[in-house]
Amino acid sequence: MSNILVELSNSLAAAAEKAAVSTLLVNARRRMPASGIAFASDLVLTADHVIEQEDGITVLLADGTEASAKLAGRDPGSDLAVLRLDGKERSAPAEPAVQASIGQLVLALGRPSNAGIEASLGVISAMGGPLRTPRGSIDRYIRTDATPYPGFSGGPLVDAEGKVVGVNTSGFGRGVVLTIPAEYAWKVAGQLARSGSVKRGFLGVRSEAVELPETAQKELKRTQATGLLLVSVERKSPAEAAKLIVGDILVGMDGQPVPDHDALFAHLAGDVVGKSVPMEVLRGGQPQVFMVEVGARP
């Protein structure tokens, strides 16, 4: 009879070995190096807060080759950055996982020194979002009990098959270590590689959360306890151009409920700048839809 613990141990070791090929060392700060993930053969995804210099950046590949790199783009709000390898050196791209689940076994990996890959075992303990942070906001996050050793920021959290579940970072302050889910991180990385930054939407309103009475919820034909009361609308803003007014209660955007500020920030963090988006409001207790062309946050 096979030993199930030996099988599990061997599977995790194989997962670490597979992911190690795409886990890189990023040397872009005065203190110890950080880690990164091969997003493409010539692109490295890492944490933005570990990029303290834009010149003289080097990346150590899994085979021990050192390559110079330049900053392709950074997004402090999500604490993600992308580097582009300068020369002919290339790395095997990581494979993102399709989904993650609470209770799932995961490995936090890092390459914080020339000595090689390091790993820490844990489980996914929580998933949530959106989340506002001192650096901005992130659409979704994962929390694990895997130990984030020094230099692990920018490295991957991987599943038992060696696929990347997300990007680990300690850059949100106050000793908080979070993992940015791969689906979201890959999306941001793609934008950074193309344009160097991530545009975030701007409506030009100030709002406060309010409770919706049962009569209003009946008019909406759904259960939604709260919405956002518009307390000011900036002149010449996208909201004013769409005829939104003070006193409107924003309850939905692009077909999705907007019960609070976090939900609104999540919608505006997507690829919506320059697009005309339907916004559902309650005006005088009656639902109305206004098309708003979302601007770019200054």
Image (tube, rainbow, N blue to C red):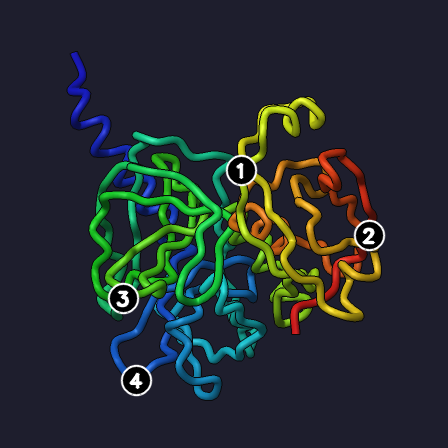
Q: CA distance from mark 4 to mark 2?
A: 44 Å
* Label 4 Cα neighbours within 10 Å, binned few <14 / some 14-19 / many ≥20: few
Q: Earlier in the sequence, mark 1 or mark 2?
A: 1
Q: Name the disc covering residue 276, or none.
A: 2
Is the Cβ of the residue at disc 3 closer than 8 Å to that at disc 2?
A: no
Q: Amino acid at mark 1?
A: Glu
* Label 2 Cα neighbours within 10 Å, binned few <14 / some 14-19 / many ≥20: some
Q: Name the disc covering residue 151, or none.
A: 3
- Image quarter of the C terminus: bottom right
Residue assigned mark 1: 211
Q: Earlier in the sequence, mark 3 or mark 4?
A: 4
Q: Amino acid at mark 4?
A: Arg
* Label 1 Cα neighbours within 10 Å, binned few <14 / some 14-19 / many ≥20: few
Percent position of residue 292, x then y:
80, 53
- Image quarter of the N terminus: top left
Q: Name the disc covering residue 30, or none.
A: 4
Q: Amino acid at mark 3?
A: Gly
Give the mark toward the camera: 3 or 1.
Answer: 1
- Please say whether residue 198 is visible from this viewpoint: yes
Question: On screen, 85 above or below 5?
Answer: below
Q: Earlier in the sequence, mark 4 or mark 1?
A: 4
Left or right position of 57 against 29 = right
Q: Earlier in the sequence, mark 4 or mark 2?
A: 4
Q: Earlier in the sequence, mark 3 or mark 2?
A: 3
Q: CA distance from mark 3 to mark 4?
A: 12 Å
* Label 3 Cα neighbours within 10 Å, binned few <14 / some 14-19 / many ≥20: many
